[in-house]
Amino acid sequence: MTCSCDNIDMSKLKEVFNTKFSVSACNSDTITNVEREVKIKFDNHQNTTSNDKFMSVIMVTIYIKKLNSGSSPGIDGIRAKHLKHALGSRIIRRTSVTFSLCLKCSIVPNTSCQGLLVPLLEKPTLDPTLPQHYRHVTVSCILYHIEAS
């Protein structure tokens, strides 16, 4: 069954997703739990030695090999297959240095915090004109997936 979503009201879809992802949509317990988890991770990170704040070329290579080659590119336009093709090149060494600096300085580049929100119809049998029948997938920068793996 082919599904065409040309009839969906984009302003309604935008309103549903804006409501779903607004801070006010989160209850205070959810926010408190997230804050607690972040604090625990931060405290654990503070207790690590500086030797743990290094990502070797071998580690980057392992993470790249784990990426799904058929995945869509993020906002940077880089696909997993591009990185796999670059294995053994200077790009991987520079990626290693970049991640090591991010870990050492406890920073995340702004580009790693951006993504493209793509609405997907939950089931092909649902009415594609109703915004509540959509779920979201966030397509983000490929380098974030390496870091988060």
Image (cartoon, grey):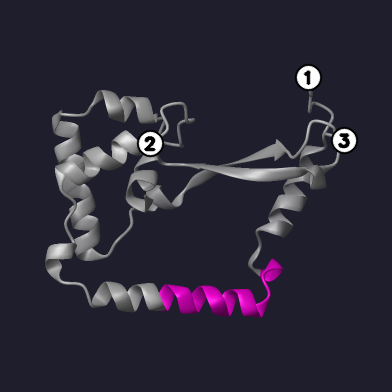
Residue of label 2? 67
Q: Distance between the residues labelled 3 and 2?
A: 34 Å
Do tag 1 and tag 2 residues touch (Cβ < 8 Å)?
A: no
Residue in view at x 41 percent, y 78 percent: 39
The type of residue carrying mark 2 is Leu
Q: Residue 127 carries which label?
A: 3
Q: Is residue 24 left or right of residue 105?
A: right
Residue in view at x 30 percent, y 37 percent: 64
Q: Residues within 10 Å of mark 2 (few under 14, many from 20)?
A: some
Residue of label 1? 2
Q: Residue 138's quadrant in the figure?
A: top right
Callout 2: SS: loop
The N terminus - image quarter? top right
Q: In this view, does 130 lie to the left or right of 61?
A: right
User: Residue 40 location in percent, x, y?
Assistant: 39, 78
The type of residue carrying mark 1 is Thr
Q: Main secondary structure of the magenta part?
A: helix
User: Residue 33 location in percent, x, y?
Assistant: 55, 77
Q: Within the magenta stretch, is there residue 140?
A: no
Disc nearest the viewer among 3 and 2 = 2
Q: Within the magenta stretch, is there residue 35?
A: yes
Q: How far apart are marks 1 and 2 (CA)?
A: 29 Å
